[in-house]
């Protein structure tokens, strides 16, 4: 143990360590506060929190796990992007390749099961926040941000569903995106769409409605694959990241983890 | 219906040697028709909300857990049930059932304790606002442990279960049934009862808007930051109905009970693609203009849908007038009546504008079960069917 401590102290006393961690070992109140304050990631937290607020039976830890799963999805997703090409000719074979050639490969499994777990975790987070009445003032706005994040999580999962380009994928997306066809006014089979016409020429038809916008075509084809890929890998994750920042910031600003007033 | 029930029982007994189990299975299959499944689970939820102090006791809850698990595991010996369960993408549903069940218990258990404590004037589980602890180490270590456990869980899951990969996409080969991803199956189930513009666009939109609007409508200042049911019974009941029944139960229904041609199958039934489709559904306009005069047999009222415009009203509005009156009454007259009776206190507390939003959301939420019941009982298809403009409710 003596040697272990000596080596530990040697590193902790070095200039490199001191340049990264601006405080001593977090053993007393001051250094523990410093550990949170001087770390860009940890300072998402306040320095001190209410004791009842961090009880596991109170928070269920579901919000934190949703965030963690989002990070796990981002990392595994970026790795998957190295192997996957979002064109009809290659998409399926790339997934097959990932499965056949990578020994003990878990990347796609972790990404897929992580996505399912994230959907469940975020629902349960909502249930917890609801049951504790934590959406009530002053947290109304943050609850709204959370609802948008929940919706985006479902959309993330939904857009990712298409990418393997197998039977499961295109038909699940076909069923889902058929809804867009019936959007009031904006879908060519939606109520009111027939009213939007100029001199008898309909403005909203199969090639110009909400579904066409979503799929980049009239069927789930190459255009849809590319659009869903871009939405899945870039657009939605960026929006989610921004909203997560807002969400966390507002948790702090609205008084931290909720508790009886 | 009773006849089919006995036929089922008879066939089960005649065909197999193991009578009791098969009889049990066909009884469960029978009870899983949505009219029973949704009704029974709703009743169960109501009972659960009323008796939350009893079933949340760890011993009772443990017993329920054990009984359900026994039933669930025993069911896996059934080939047809196991076929659904073992699909890799359905595994999350099993997890959803268990996690939602556990978390609901956890929340209501603490609500029961808190409500008891408040009655006795004791402090809440969550009280002690000034009782602060440092984030390092108390919170960061909890987070670290949660993170490690979650990672381990995910890795084990990934090792045990391969991600599914079906044959390559083939636009000419439509699988039967075509199901949406499991978390959207509740919405897909709504398609049975509503046109896509309601089931796929309006209702999801209203769910999102409704959830966001919730804190602005719920003006009850109590129950902020702690588990309780007694201080906000109405809001919690409505929310739990929406979350448990209209979302989770419909997902379970869509996963376990919908087979080829979107026909209904019991959990222990084989998915037979050749089973005949459901019978014809009728509109409110058919009932009013055709069925009613036929029954009444009046000399001055001949059965038949009106196809002539009346005064300035186009024919389709005349035809759909009964349905429009019903729907109009539900959306616009009923709230006025309710505001003076059942919702009197709510109306006084939240005011006119909030009450309008509240009713918009509540009425659309409850039109779903209302239409389900009407479909089950009377094969009702549309209240209003203006197919000319794809405007069907």
Image (cartoon, coloured by chain):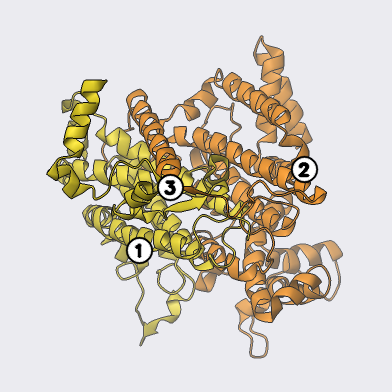
Residue B326 in picture, x, y percent from top left: 72, 71
Q: Is residue B190 left or right of residue A160?
A: right
Element at label 1: helix
Q: Residue furthest left?
A: A15
Residue ID at (72%, 27%)? B59
Residue at image coords 76%, 62%? B291
Pointer 2 residue: B47
Question: Does the rendering let one see residue B43?
Answer: yes
Near-viewer residue (B157 or B265): B157
Q: Position of residue B240 (x, y in %)?
A: 65, 51
Give the Cα separation between the discs numbered 3 and 1. Answer: 48 Å
Residue B207 lies, with reference to residue B330, above or below; the image says above
**Disc on res. A211:** 1
Q: Chain A is drawn in which colour?
A: yellow
Residue at point 37%, 55% (across, down): A44
Instruction: Report whether mark 3 lies on the same chain as mark 1.
Output: no
Quick one: quadrant of the N terminus of chain A? top left
- Earlier residue among tags 3 and 2: 2
Q: Which one is in front, A187 or A119?
A: A119
Across and down, in percent, residue B96 comes to 52, 38
Q: Chain B is drawn in which colour?
A: orange
Residue B362 relative to residue B166: left or right:
right
User: Which residue carries the number 3 mark?
Assistant: B135
Cα distance in 3D space between marks 3 and 2:
41 Å
Asked if the residues shown at circle 3 and circle 2 are in contact, with their CB atoms under 8 angstroms apart, the answer is no
The secondary element bearing badge 2 is classed as helix
């Amino acid at each position: 143990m003596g040697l272990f401590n000596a080596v530990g102290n040697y590193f902790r006393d070095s200039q490199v360590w001191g340049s990264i961690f601006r405080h001593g070992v977090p053993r007393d109140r001051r250094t523990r506060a410093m550990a949170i304050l001087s770390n860009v990631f940890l300072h998402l937290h306040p320095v001190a929190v209410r004791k009842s607020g961090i009880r596991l039976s109170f928070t269920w830890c579901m919000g934190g796990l949703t965030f963690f799963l989002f990070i796990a999805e981002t990392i595994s997703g970026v790795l998957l992007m190295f192997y996957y090409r979002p064109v009809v000719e290659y998409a399926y074979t790339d997934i097959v390749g990932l499965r056949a050639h990578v020994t003990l490969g878990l990347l796609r499994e972790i990404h897929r099961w992580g996505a399912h777990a994230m959907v469940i975790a975020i629902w349960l987070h909502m249930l917890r926040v609801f049951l504790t009445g934590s959406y009530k003032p002053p947290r109304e706005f943050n609850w709204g941000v959370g609802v948008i994040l929940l919706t985006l999580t479902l959309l993330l999962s939904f857009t990712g569903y298409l990418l393997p380009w197998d039977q499961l994928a295109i038909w699940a997306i076909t069923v889902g995106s058929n809804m867009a066809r019936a959007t009031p006014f904006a879908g060519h089979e939606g109520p009111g769409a027939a009213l939007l016409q100029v001199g008898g020429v309909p403005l909203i038809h199969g090639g110009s409605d909400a579904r066409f916008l979503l799929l980049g075509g009239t069927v789930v084809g190459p255009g849809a694959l590319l659009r869903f890929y871009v939405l899945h890998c870039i657009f939605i994750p960026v929006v989610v990241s921004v909203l997560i920042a807002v969400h966390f910031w507002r948790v702090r600003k609205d008084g931290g983890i909720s508790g009886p007033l | 219906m009773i006849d089919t029930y006995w036929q089922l029982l008879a066939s089960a007994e005649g065909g197999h040697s193991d009578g009791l189990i098969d009889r049990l299975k066909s009884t469960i299959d029978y009870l899983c028709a949505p009219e029973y499944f949704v009704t029974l689970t709703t009743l169960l939820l109501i009972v659960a909300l009323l008796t939350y102090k009893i079933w949340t006791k760890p011993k009772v809850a443990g017993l329920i857990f054990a009984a359900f698990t026994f039933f669930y595991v025993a069911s896996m010996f059934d080939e047809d049930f196991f076929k659904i369960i073992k699909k890799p993408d359905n595994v999350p549903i099993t997890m959803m059932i268990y996690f939602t069940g556990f978390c609901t218990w956890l929340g209501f258990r603490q609500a029961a304790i808190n409500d008891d404590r408040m009655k006795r004037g004791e402090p809440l589980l969550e009280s002690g606002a000034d009782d602060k602890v440092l984030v390092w180490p108390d919170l960061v270590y909890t987070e670290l442990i949660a993170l490690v456990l979650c990672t381990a869980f995910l890795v084990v899951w990934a090792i045990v279960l391969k991600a599914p990969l079906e044959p390559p996409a083939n636009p000419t080969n439509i699988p039967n049934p075509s199901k949406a991803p499991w978390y959207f199956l509740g919405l897909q189930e709504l398609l049975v009862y509503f046109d896509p513009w309601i089931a796929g666009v309006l209702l999801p939109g209203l769910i999102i808007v409704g959830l966001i609007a919730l804190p602005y409508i719920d003006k009850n200042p109590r129950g902020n930051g702690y588990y309780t049911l007694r201080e906000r019974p109405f809001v919690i009941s409505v929310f739990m109905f929406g979350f448990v029944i209209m979302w989770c139960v419909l997902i379970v229904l869509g996963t376990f009970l919908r087979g080829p041609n979107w026909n209904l199958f019991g959990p222990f039934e084989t998915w037979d693609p050749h089973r005949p489709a459901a019978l014809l559904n009728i509109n409110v306009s058919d009932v009013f203009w055709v069925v009613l005069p036929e029954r009444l047999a009046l000399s001055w009222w001949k059965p038949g849908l009106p196809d002539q415009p009346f005064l300035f009203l186009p024919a389709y509005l005349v035809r759909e007038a009964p349905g429009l009156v019903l729907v109009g009454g539900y959306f616009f007259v009923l709230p006025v009546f309710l505001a003076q009776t059942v919702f009197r206190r709510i109306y006084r507390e939240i005011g006119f504008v909030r009450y309008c939003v509240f009713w918009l959301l509540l009425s659309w939420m409850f039109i779903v079960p209302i239409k389900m019941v009407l479909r089950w009982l009377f094969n009702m298809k549309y209240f209003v069917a203006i197919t000319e403009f794809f405007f069907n409710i």
